[in-house]
Image (cartoon, grey):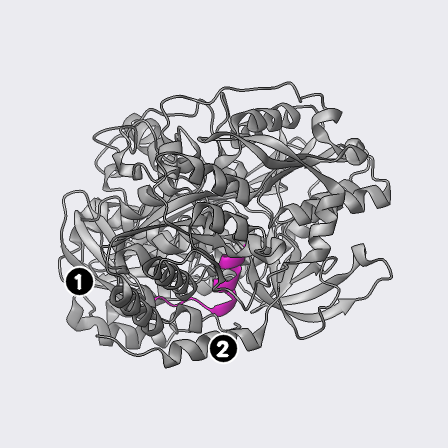
Amino acid sequence: MCLAIPAKIISISENNDSLQRMARVDFSGVIKDISLAYLPDAKVNDYVIVHAGLALSILDEDEAQITLAAFAEMNNVS
Amino acid sequence: MELTCPLPLNYQQIVMAHGGGGRLMQQLLARVVQPTFSNDYLNQQHDSAVFTVGNQRLAFTSDSYVIKPLFFKGGDIGKLSVCGTVNDLAMSGAKPLFLSCSLIIEEGFPIETLQRILQSMQETAEQAGVMIVTGDTKVVDHGKGDGLYINTAGIGLLETDLIIQPSSIQVGDAVILSGDLARHGIAVMLEREGLDFESEIVSDCAVLSPLVQDLLQAGIEIHCLRDLTRGGLASCLIELAHSANVHIEITETALPIIEPVRTACELLGFDPLYIANEGCFALFLPAEQVASALAILQKHQTGQHACQIGTVQSTHEQGLLTLSTAMGIIRGLDLLSGEQLPRIC
Amino acid sequence: MFHKQAFRNPAIAKKLVAAIAQISTQPWTIMEVCGGQTHSIIQYGIDQLLPDNIRLIHGPGCPVCVTPLAYIDKALAIASVPDIIFCSFGDMLRVPSSHSDLLSAKAQGADIRIVYSPLDALKIAQENPNREVVFFAVGFETTAPTTALAAQQAKQLGLKNFSLLTCHVCVPPVMRALLKSENCQVQGFLAAGHVCAIMGYQQYHPIAQRYRVPIVVTGFEPVDILQGIYQCVQQLEAGRFEVENAYSRVVKEQGNTAAQNAMQQVFQTVDRNWRGLGEIPQSGLMLAPSFDAWNAELKFNVQTINTEEPKACRSGDVLQGLITPPQCPEFGKTCTPEHPLGATMVSTEGACAAYYRYRRGVN
């Protein structure tokens, strides 16, 4: 549940059977083959959140930018 | 740490964690091994025993090498078995001279593989300027060993008058680290069966005696040296803080960790502060000599990432290691029970 | 990597801490549900950064911690069957049962292997067709889909030498159980971000409404956690009790529907004992009857093993926020990471273990 970290999809081995859909991902210098069985929309260059060999969700870069922008706007309080 | 108030030994049998460099190993040594052999040399609790023969001070040490896989990125069991023992000698300030080599070979082990490993030992010995002058060979039944175990013992000569040992650590000392953290442990872990990770992470396995000899020749007043092996930086500094009765503080943002190693640690749930190196040491010295020591270390490829990571803050009865975190918080670091296991949650 | 440094930026963290201090006018008690969040909080010292009026209670969100003794005894029984390859996540190995632990069983010769994924265990089964391979499937809704995938693949491949000892648990029922307790101190929740990545957060709306508690879906980096706390305090101060998402780069309201569908096919919901908390209705997942052939409990006939929990352990009180770990009389004395009495000392993420490891000797 907890230990899930982002990885970038380098390549996808497409398979007619969705259960067997695999991706090769890069965790900043550590490469691993993981399952994309439950993320039919994931594509190469997407960042996905990986837990125990399975991609859980696609990381939404726009949302990350919105969050970070909100912090930048937050007034400095002393 | 439990010497005064021992917890009961909970295991009736040896478990892997007894060799993991953490609390269980300390307990085993403190309660089973050290009381049996107790003497002044052993009780120094340093990587080597230092004693005088005639007018010469000599250092003597021994280590056994058990590693899966036998070959890994950046080394093999042979190179490791020379580096480890040479480095233990170097950590007393000694110049390593002679090594022994004892082989415990599993029946069926390919001779060609053995030759490769011995060749690697010889090459590493030449780099370190030591000779392998004696040894022993035993063969055990098929299935009774992981191919090959190696034990090496080593003798070195102290040409310095400095007493390099934990009790020489002083309040105000700077702590320098000679290289980046956790690289050996992660390189080996990622190649282990069952994890199926690929990376370019190369073990830092290397001979450290040239660095130490250069420091000594330049007149650096070394107070203590300790190479980071099992248990990593935190375990090493906790033991030293305990032996020297001091409070050591290290700074999180100063710790050199390469990005793939950091990521691998996050992936497996490891704390890099507790992961082994095999070519990296902590150096305690007067603060005013930090710049000159770093200049010497950084000339060596093995020492190119050398940097100051902390200071000895004060005396402390039980010994204490703290980490000043990136968030500006100070927290204590304690020994782990044993080796870290990959965690999922 | 991807924005990682930004979400660990001390300057942003300090800004959020100041903002929390500025908006809070009274004491608030917030529970982080997930053990991964507890780990980050202690590791980065977030609880020390927060103003004194914000109190964090470390939640039950560590599946290793809450796995009942009975299942560890079942695991040991299976692992000691001759010629079995027993696969597990590393953190389960040190968890003591009533009489032993998997590490000790390994020391006595059992073939116990640490894997990163149930899919790796499946691979071991394919490579060792003449041996039985069992995977110990623990974890919350984050981990359950990977188990579901392993089960589906095993069925598809007709793999007969692979089976699963399944002890998955679900987060919403335990939140309800905690809130129902008379003594419950929790005024707001940080919901577990990666559980929500799978399950979404629709199921939290009724909990927030019924128990009038704000629930903020929260990530794991220090800035994520502080943002979750900030939003939670904002709601508490305004008297609101809604479900909000402070981890929108990873979590969508509906979650991962493909994974949810797989879980529905593979699992059925059951009542489950939680170590330190007792039985919680409809809080566990076990394999559905259509997967009986891959159910290790049936295959190795261990379903009748039933072990009582020790009484001295007050992990239930720790989890409910009634005491902090050092307030337990056994803490650091008879109960240590080497010899844990209960759930919260067992895993490095357990509240007691985290306190023991990071706090001892300081102050």
Q: Is residue C295 above or below residue C354?
A: above
- Image coords of residue C219 (percent x, y): 48, 60
SS for dot 2: helix
Question: What chain does badge 2 belong to?
Answer: A
Quarter where residue A16 is shown: bottom right
Please say whether residue B26 is visible from this viewpoint. Answer: yes
- Image coords of residue B24 (percent x, y): 38, 35
Which label was assigned to residue C343? Answer: none
User: Which amino acid, mark 2?
Assistant: Ile
Q: How many marks?
A: 2
- Image coords of residue B161 (percent x, y): 17, 58
Q: Which residue is mark 2?
A: A66
Question: What chain does badge 1 belong to?
Answer: B
What's the CA distance linking mark 2 and mark 1? 46 Å
Residue at the spot x=27%, y=42% of the render? Answer: B45
Q: Which residue is mark 1?
A: B173
